Amino acid sequence: MADMRSDSCEKLAGMRVLRAGAIIAVSDLTKSLHFYRDQLGLAPDAVYDDPPYATLACAGARISLAQQGFTAPDRPGVVMTAPGDPSLASVVLIMEVDDADAARELLGSCGVTFS
């Protein structure tokens, strides 16, 4: 089996990868920033107004939030669309922690709800 760790990424792609991350389509950038930045504690890297877009970082990962319905020069022909039902989201953000119960309690105290 091939070594798929991050140090082998540029070998697999055939080019030097400068950074990697995911773009999540959101229906409300302001509410999403409140959740990811203020409640989960991801560090903002950049926030833009036109188009509404933000990039946050956590543990070396870059997570971008794109307000649905807008195009952008770095993704020509792609219009991001957030699911109408959040339980049908096509992206799941994984954040590994030392103590999941303590993390859940802390996030709950910050207003995060769990279903």
Image (cartoon, helix red, strand yellow):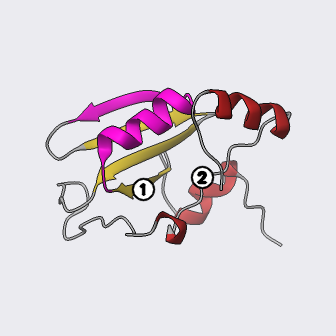
* Callout 2 crowding tier (Cα within 10 Å): few <14, some 14–19, many ≥20: few
Q: Quadrant of residue 105?
A: top right
Residue 12 image position (x, y, % from top left): 60, 64
Is residue 79 something that shows in the picture? yes
Q: Residue at x 59, y 28 (%)?
A: 110
What amino acid is at disc 2?
Answer: Leu
Vertical comparison of 114 with 83: above or below: above
Residue 18 image position (x, y, % from top left): 46, 43
What amino acid is at disc 1?
Answer: Ile
Q: Residue at x 59, y 39 (%)?
A: 112
Residues drawn in magenta: 27-48
Residue where numbered disc 2 is placed = 93
Q: How many badges with numbers are in the image?
A: 2
Residue 95 image position (x, y, % from top left): 68, 43
* Callout 1 crowding tier (Cα within 10 Å): few <14, some 14–19, many ≥20: many
- Furthest toward the left, the residue is 50
Which disc, if any, is residue 74?
none
Answer yes or no: do the residues labelled 1 and 2 have beta carbons within 8 Å? yes
Question: Quarter of the image containing the N terminus?
Answer: bottom right
Which disc, if any, is residue 24?
1
Q: Secondary structure at mark 2?
A: loop
Residue 46 is covered by the magenta coloring = yes
Question: Quarter of the image containing the C terminus?
Answer: bottom right
Residue 10 image position (x, y, % from top left): 57, 55
